[in-house]
Image (cartoon, helix red, strand yellow):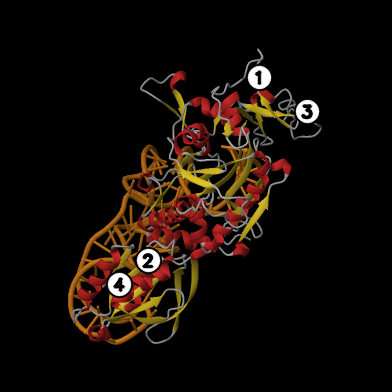
Amino acid sequence: MADNDLMSKLMSLCKRRGFIFQSSEIYGGIGGFWDYGPLGVELKRNLKDAWWRDMVSGHDDTTTPQGAPSTYEMVGLDCSIIMHPQVWKVSGHYDLFHDMLVDCRTCKARFRADHLKSGECPKKPSKRPGEHTECDLTDPREFNLMFKTHVGALFDLASEAFLRPETAQGIFVNFKNVLDTSRVKLPFGIAQIGKSFRNEITPRYYTFRSREFEQMEIEFFCRPDESRHWYTYWRDRRFAWYTSLGLKSEKLRLRDHDAAELSHYSCGTADVEYAFPFLQEGDFGELEGVAHRGDFDLRSHMEGKLVRSGDGFAVELDAEGKPRHPGSGKDLRYFDDQTRERFVPHVIEPSAGADRGTLAFLCEAYTEDQAPDEKGQPQERVVMKFHPRLAPIKAAVFPLVKRDGMPDIGQDIYRELKRRWNVAYDEGGSIGRRYRRQDESGTPFCITVDSQTLADQTVTVRDRDTLEQVRVAMKELSSFLSEKLETP
RNA sequence: GCGGGUGUAGUUCAGUGGUAGAACGCAUGCUUCCCAAGCCUGAUGUCUGGGGUUCGAAUCCCCACACCCGCUCCA
């Protein structure tokens, strides 16, 4: 049984507190698109920043990470959303995402229009679609899972272009540029964070399956004979990343795809999956796919669109024996100056959904527990237990009361801390109310100026999860928070 | 894409043809020395949208849209 109760409560909190809004809400909304509010944008940005820091800018390319075959390098990239249409023809997305389909109104089956003569109607005895008397086929309709647009003011076929359905291709088509300009040597990774667009038939599950979404992707290039080892390294490393940010391991799982499930390009894929509350008990939803893509992508962009052929891949040919979708013809091979070999590197692709990650951390953070009221009676409390690195607001500063100069001291502290972190200042309402407000925002620490502050320049720091308070000298606050917030 | 449900204040909801409501939240001020307190004052509604029926529609009818649920799909 899915936990719909939890999901409704989380969704109303996200609206109430400004994490997530429906896109274009005042006009009735638009299906499959979502906006992040003031707290949501901080949360999602923190997630992306943590990813970029942990995978890219903080990467140490002089030390072999645990579990890795060797040291490696890592660089970043930021590619355009609209690319040359040939990219999508060669990558296979155009053919896969762009079909004329026929639906049967009776049996609800869907067929490719060009497969009607070879397809099989699900009704028994087996016949071709349309051959049963009850069959009620629609006209062929265009299904385009890529968003189409036009480049330039002229709307004709030649100007047709697509919003990218994945960020990966931008990395592959820039492979040579990066090689030629950054001095990287194999093995190395190219990372990118950016928006992608898929015209999903059924957007569903809050922000989980959206039509516009953000990906955090690495294309990791390595020698073919080391690729298996790198695949397991990345698979395990990426799984561990989520637990390090607070997803409980029993709600996470790493699932290897079986052969039938593998994508057209992949010779090995594992998903990092999370037990979202909107799914049935025992079901998991994908946060990230880690795929072994072999040399499929670089080869495609050299030779043309590939199709499976025996155990490997071959360029798909048209009726005249020419490539159906020709590649760039550019040599995208890597030259190893130690071994004097020239070859197409293999690719390991850890591809994470930033919105799905954000949603998983929201679900994980939502907690109801008990906190005492002013009379000491336990009251229900809603608290978002974000990992400190992800928390939208890192600390809040309160004067206990609005007199005796406490607001001035509180504002001084606020201004000092604001130089390093996103910090809130609040003097409205009772102290308990202000604590609870920050609990729903997921703020890990609340700093309160009280009468003792006036005497000895210490403040109380209240812990979001334990409710415990410690006294800290004002001048130690910055280093105190630094240790609490930035120690992994 | 199919079927079911829902749509009223920021949130949760009441309102069944006759003046748009409650609680919480928010804002304001007083009080308050540590966990949603008390009191003051106040703001906030395209009743999802569009059509129709009616003297009159949040309420009845039709059409759309959005979200939730179950199938289907997930390259």
Give the labeled residue for mark 1.
A317
Mark 4 or mark 1, earlier in chain: 1
Distance from label 2 to label 3 (Cα)? 64 Å
**Both on one chain, marks 3 and 1?**
yes
Q: Residues within 10 Å of mark 2 (few under 14, many from 20)?
A: many
- Three-letter residue code for mark 4: Val
Residue at position x 58%, y 65% in the image: A248
Q: Is residue A137 left or right of residue B61?
A: right
Q: Residues within 10 Å of mark 1 (few under 14, many from 20)?
A: some
**Both on one chain, marks 2 and 4?**
yes
Task: Chain letter for mark 4, please.
Answer: A
Mark 2 or mark 1, earlier in chain: 1
Task: Chain letter for mark 1, please.
Answer: A
Q: Indicate whether A153 appears above or below A178.
A: above
Distance from label 2 to label 1 (Cα)? 57 Å
Is there a contact, CB below 8 Å, between mark 3 and mark 1?
no
Residue at position x 26%, y 73% in the image: A427
Distance from label 4 to label 1 (Cα)? 67 Å
Residue A355: in sight, yes or no? yes
Give the labeled residue for mark 4.
A397
Is there a contact, CB below 8 Å, between mark 2 and mark 3?
no
- Three-letter residue code for mark 1: Leu
Q: Indicate whether A345 appears above or below A419.
A: above
Give the labeled residue for mark 2.
A394
Task: Chain letter for mark 3, please.
Answer: A
In terms of secondary structure, where does tag 4 sit? strand
Task: Chain letter for mark 2, please.
Answer: A
Give the labeled residue for mark 3.
A127
- Three-letter residue code for mark 3: Lys
